[in-house]
Amino acid sequence: EEARVAWFELAGVAMSNVPFGPVVLQTQHTYLKPVIHPATGAIEAELVFSVREEFATTLTDVLARRVLLAFEPGHGFESVGRAADLLAAELGWDEGTRRDQIDEYVEWVGRLAVPSSAGDDLRADLEEVS
């Protein structure tokens, strides 16, 4: 793995042109190795890669367009807090911005929800999202 990273660096290939860019990032920064979403195996490096190399600037962009957790069962809500922490560190968000990003993501996912005949409120399912 390290040899592959070294080759790309030597060749001057941008990580964004490499299909396994998050793996390269994870190799260079082992603190980004943890799995953020066990059901999919998504790792923290994928989220950071989205910001650093793909210019993502919102939690919704990262979870919906980059790592696609928004479309998984549970919409990645169990990972939203940690994802917001990672993006806050990368993008310099304060706690208010972090909270706004989570609220924005919850609202966006809510717009995708198919109303149930029982009238369930998606927000009721999200009380534990932090």
Image (cartoon, helix red, strand yellow):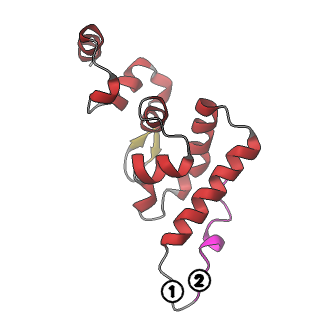
Q: Position of residue 23 (x, y in %)?
A: 34, 29
Q: Position of residue 49 (x, y in %)?
A: 43, 32
Give me the disc on residue 116: 1
Query: Circle 1 — which element?
Result: loop
In magenta, the rendered stretch is 119-130
Residue count near mark 2 (Cα–Cα under 10 Å), binned few <14, some 14–19, many ≥20: few
Q: Which mark is residue 38?
A: none
Dominant SS in magenta: loop
Q: Is residue 83 above or below residue 60?
A: above
The quarter of the rendered structure image containing the N terminus is top left
Looking at the image, which residue is at 55% across and 55% down? 78
Quarter of the image where one finds residue 123: bottom right
Secondary structure under the numbered disc 2 in the rendered image: loop
Amino acid type at mark 1: Ser
**Label 2 sits on residue:** 120
- Res. 113 visible in picture: yes
Q: Judge from the rendering whether residue 68 lies leftward or rightward of residue 115; answer left or right.
A: left
